[in-house]
């Protein structure tokens, strides 16, 4: 069988994953066969996972975080809503969220038997007045997004948390992508800024860990207890995770990346990729394309359909928003040189 070669990142502009840090690769290889899903047996990787959760707590200003390393943001979002459902006292549970929530919330609603109520947006972020109108006595969770996957927008998390508190519901923040960028901004988005109960934050995105390495954080162990199930045939007698068996590669890779980059490396990365996004937005505006100003390092712009398809045809991995705009995520592998090359091709195909 011919040996396959993984696709490189040289023309990938649409992904929220990136090249792992070299130390993350090395650490992941060492722990490939370990299973943090059975922490009593695999004690070393279990210790490493606790270290990862503690450091993620530093990123989000939570001094004693509960949580674990998930397979990604989808699992973390599902688990957060599962916590809310398991703690609620209603036969008709609903979740209120902005229309910008990740598609994993639709999966979660289907899996968990929840009604997902989505409110319209204002400038691509949550309209909290509209969200408040959807909340009722059966609302079990209110969701905010800190770095939306479509436009990189940050919702008014303190207001959303206040809505949840008033309703007696849990507040969940999806910071899967934005969580490693936001510590170096002036946004109010974390556990210190608002009464947030649970949060999704993914080391395998801007954290530069290997895939898979997502993260679920909770304000207390009591919240995770709502997920616990008995595991009588393991050395560990219960677990709160969703997937059970998990590779220690993601855990070890996350620990290595955090050790190497938190905080100074991530601070430098945040400044660099935001500068690239701002530069790209300015270049697209100068060419006359309508652009959504980047709040975080994600650029959306209207370009002709035939130009978009031509760029894909020569190997640029680009995607569209739901409104058919070009969407470029300025991840660490997306250099200024890469963006300049992309613009050169854009100019060529849009002028033919």
Image (tube, grey):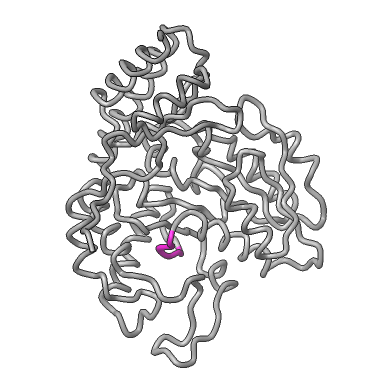
Query: Residue drawn at (50%, 69%), measured in percent from left and top?
Result: 221
Residue 49 position (above or below residue 330) = below
Q: Assign the C terminus to one quadrant of the image.
A: top left
Query: Residue drawn at (70%, 55%), measured in percent from left and top?
Result: 169
For residue 88, what is the image quadrant?
bottom right
- Residue 236's x, y, as percent? 41, 85
Labels in figure, total: 0
- In the displayed structure image, the side of residue 68 where residue 173 appears, left or right: right
Q: Nearer the viewer, residue 302 or 146?
A: 302
Q: Nearer the viewer, residue 230 or 331?
A: 331
Evaluate whether residue 44 shows in this view.
yes
- Residue 25's x, y, as percent? 21, 56
Spot the residue most to the bottom.
233
- Residue 266's x, y, as percent? 28, 40
Residue 63 position (above or below residue 46) = above
- Residue 351's x, y, as percent? 40, 8
- In the displayed structure image, the side of residue 182 where residue 165 appears, left or right: right
Evaluate whether residue 297 shows in this view.
no
Magenta-highlighted residues: 66-71
Residue 104 position (above or below residue 234) = above
Residue 84 among those drawn in magenta: no
Query: Residue drawn at (70%, 35%), measured in percent from left and top?
Result: 128
Q: Nearer the viewer, residue 158 or 253?
A: 253
Spot the residue most to the front.
1
Q: Assign the N terminus to one quadrant of the image.
A: bottom left
Residue 253 position (above or below residue 21) = below
For residue 78, what is the image quadrant?
bottom right
């Amino acid at each position: 069988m011919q040996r396959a070669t993984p696709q490189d990142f040289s023309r990938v502009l649409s992904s929220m994953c990136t090249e792992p840090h070299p130390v993350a690769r090395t650490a992941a290889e060492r722990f490939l066969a370990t299973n943090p899903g059975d922490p009593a047996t695999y004690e070393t990787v279990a210790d490493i996972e606790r270290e990862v959760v503690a450091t993620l707590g530093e990123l989000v200003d939570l001094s004693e975080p509960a949580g674990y390393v998930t397979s990604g943001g989808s699992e973390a979002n599902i688990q957060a809503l599962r916590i809310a459902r398991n703690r609620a006292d209603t036969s008709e549970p609903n979740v209120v969220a902005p229309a910008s929530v990740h598609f994993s919330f639709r999966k979660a609603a289907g899996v968990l038997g929840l009604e997902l109520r989505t409110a319209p947006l204002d400038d691509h972020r949550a309209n909290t007045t509209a969200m408040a109108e959807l909340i009722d006595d059966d609302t079990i969770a209110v969701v905010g997004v800190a770095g939306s996957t479509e436009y990189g927008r940050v919702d008014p998390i303190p207001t959303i948390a206040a809505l949840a508190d008033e309703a007696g519901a849990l507040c969940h923040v999806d910071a899967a992508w934005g969580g490693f960028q936001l510590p170096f901004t002036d946004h109010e988005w974390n556990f210190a800024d608002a009464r947030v109960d649970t949060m999704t934050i993914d080391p395998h995105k801007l954290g530069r860990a290997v895939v898979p390495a997502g993260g679920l954080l909770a304000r207390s162990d009591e919240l995770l207890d709502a997920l616990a199930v008995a595991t009588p045939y393991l050395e560990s007698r219960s677990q709160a995770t969703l997937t059970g068996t998990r590779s220690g590669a993601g855990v070890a890779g996350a620990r290595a990346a955090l050790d190497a980059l938190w905080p100074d490396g991530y601070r430098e990365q945040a400044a660099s990729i935001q500068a690239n996004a701002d530069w790209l937005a300015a270049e697209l505006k100068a060419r006359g394309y309508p652009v959504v100003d980047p709040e975080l390092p994600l650029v959306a712009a209207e370009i002709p359909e035939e130009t978009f398809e031509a760029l894909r045809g020569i190997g640029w991995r680009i995607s569209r928003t739901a409104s058919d705009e070009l969407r470029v995520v300025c991840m660490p592998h997306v250099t200024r040189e890469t963006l300049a090359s992309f613009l050169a091709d854009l100019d060529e195909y849009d002028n033919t």
